[in-house]
Image (cartoon, rainbow, N blue to C red):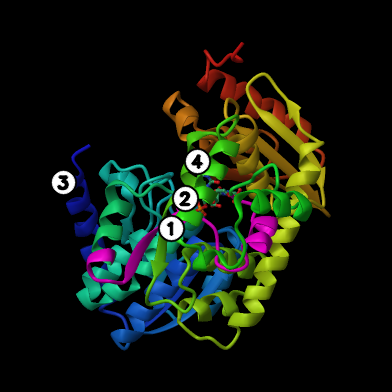
């Protein structure tokens, strides 16, 4: 990969998108309901407003026909439609929209895009699953609109952290620019939110440790290390003792991703109203799940009105994620090539699947299936090592979902699907078969 050439090509696409956007007085923005989608919306909304372009933004959990119907009903003929963090995989669905479309996304493109411009790392040869998020792509476009938008880089960094990406290549470039402009600072330590160390370790689902969710074990662990108080006030020696002790806990089973996710550079967002990136990501993911889209977007727009409420909600949400992961531990089954569970009324299937593959068994991708009323939602997660061996969960879930009358997609390392009730077993069998073909030599370590 020649990053300079590829990044230049992406910047050219971003320039084309900026040229189109700047012709409009009003824009219809549609973005995704997770941290990456909300930060993407936060970036584009601020960039638009700074150019006196008005916008109407909607945040949605997935891009399906109902979203296209909503766009058709609520968009004036002479408006531009911008999709952020979605739109590349749904070319057929969005082609029903008659207004001009710009897609700012990092999912694998499927089919002929009806968009006037599709700004997407995959079409310039960069893997969008790991190297740039929807918010990173949107940030590139905002920088083409106005270089002063560099102050929005913190949101791009938060989006990439939310999508569990790596900070080399394109994300590394955004980070370097953000640090140079003093928009982001870096400190070393345990990659978790701010606050009382015992409490934060108790409710934080990542890193997932053998003490997570257990206040007594956490008290013993911290006593042994002689550490108490707020994590942000720990001195360098205490931070070192804490990170070494966590590294030791991870040494046994965890994947390299888990170690990366636990220890290392912590990004401090100097221009955002929530400065610890892990806190901001947790708050935004919570707002998305709770359908408090206005709350999430307003926090990205630096409005403190609902911040305390959102912080409290994020803590409760993380507590429930930890409970769900623990519940899931007892329900795990193994196919020939995947670990999986089929549950009902469980939340956070994405975090459950991610925890299993990162912390419990990194040799097998994990698929979590959850039935709520008449909807069955699936999340699948792998590791970079498995992707290196040929794993493509996006393909596997799309094909298996098609077989049972559902739909799915996403990234090679992380993908999702919706399938009809009653089809979970058949769906899992098909995913297992496809993944076994993708990872032919995958055999259990003796
Ligand atoms: O909507 P989007 O495609 O950007 O979401 C990607 C999802 O995949 C996020 O929920 C992110 O946390 C998850 N992910 C993961 N493990 C990875 C990469 C992404 O769980 N290695
Ligand atoms: O829902 P979940 O977080 O597991 O989604 C993981 C990835 O799969 C995201 O990139 C999401 O956009 C994608 N996805 C999809 N089609 C679905 C469900 C999820 O493309 N039906
Ligand atoms: Zn994303």
Query: Which class describes the residues within 10 Å of circle 3: few (<14), some (14-19), or many (20+)?
Result: few
SS for callout 2: helix
CA distance separating discs 2 and 1:
6 Å
Q: Is residue 270 left or right of residue 173?
A: right
**Disc 2 marks which residue?**
240
**Mark 4 vs 3, N-terminal side:** 3
N-term mark: 4 or 1: 1
Q: CA distance from mark 2 to mark 4?
A: 15 Å
**Label 4, on which residue?**
259
Q: Residue at x 52, y 38 (%)?
A: 394
Compare residues 119 and 323 and report the one nearer the observer: 323
Provide the secondary structure element on which disc 1 rests: helix
Q: Earlier in the sequence, mark 2 or mark 4?
A: 2
Which circle's residue, 2 or 3, is located before the other in the chain? 3
Is 193 included in the stretch rendered in magenta?
Answer: yes
Mark 3 vs 1: CB contact within 8 A = no
The correct choice, above or below, for 412 with respect to 15 in the image is above
State the CA–CA distance, disc 4 to disc 3.
Answer: 31 Å
């Amino acid at each position: 990969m020649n990053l300079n050439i590829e990044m230049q090509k992406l910047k050219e696409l971003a320039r084309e998108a900026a040229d189109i956007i700047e012709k409009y007085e009003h824009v219809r923005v549609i973005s995704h309901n997770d941290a990456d989608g909300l930060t993407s919306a936060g970036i584009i909304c601020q960039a638009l407003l700074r150019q006196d372009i008005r916008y109407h933004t909607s945040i949605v959990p997935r891009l399906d026909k109902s979203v296209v119907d909503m766009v058709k009903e609520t968009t004036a003929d002479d408006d531009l439609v911008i999709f952020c963090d979605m739109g590349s995989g749904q070319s057929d669905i969005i082609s029903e929209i008659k207004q001009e479309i710009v897609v700012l996304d990092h999912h694998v493109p499927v089919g002929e895009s009806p968009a006037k411009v599709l700004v997407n790392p995959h079409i310039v040869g960069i893997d969008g699953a790991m190297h740039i998020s929807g918010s990173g792509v949107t940030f590139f476009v905002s920088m083409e609109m106005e270089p002063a938008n560099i102050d929005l880089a913190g949101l791009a960094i938060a989006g990439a952290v939310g999508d569990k990406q790596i900070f080399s290549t394109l994300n590394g470039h955004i980070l370097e620019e953000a640090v140079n402009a003093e928009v982001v600072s870096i400190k070393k330590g345990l990659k978790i939110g701010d606050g009382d160390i015992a409490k934060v370790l108790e409710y934080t689902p990542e890193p997932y440790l053998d003490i997570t969710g257990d206040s007594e074990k956490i008290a013993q662990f911290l006593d042994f290390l002689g550490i108490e108080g707020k994590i942000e006030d720990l001195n360098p020696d205490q931070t070192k003792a804490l990170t070494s002790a966590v590294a030791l806990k991870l040494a046994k089973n965890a994947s390299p991703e888990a170690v990366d996710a636990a220890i290392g550079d912590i990004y401090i967002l100097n221009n955002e109203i929530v400065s610890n990136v892990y806190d901001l990501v947790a708050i935004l993911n919570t707002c998305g799940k709770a359908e408090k889209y206005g709350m999430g977007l307003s926090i990205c727009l630096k409005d403190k009105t609902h911040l305390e409420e959102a912080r409290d909600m994020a803590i409760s949400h993380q507590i429930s994620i930890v409970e769900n992961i623990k519940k899931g531990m007892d329900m795990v089954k193994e196919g020939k090539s995947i670990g999986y569970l089929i549950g009902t009324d469980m939340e956070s299937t994405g975090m459950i699947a991610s925890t299993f593959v990162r912390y419990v068994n990194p040799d097998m991708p994990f698929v979590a299936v959850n039935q709520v009323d008449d909807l069955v939602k699936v999340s699948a997660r792998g590791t970079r090592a498995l992707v290196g061996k040929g794993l493509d969960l996006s393909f596997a879930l799309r094909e298996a979902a098609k077989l049972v009358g559902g739909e799915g997609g996403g990234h090679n390392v992380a993908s999702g699907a919706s399938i009809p009730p009653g089809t979970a077993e058949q769906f899992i069998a098909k995913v297992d078969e496809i993944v076994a073909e993708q990872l032919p030599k995958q055999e259990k370590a003796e």
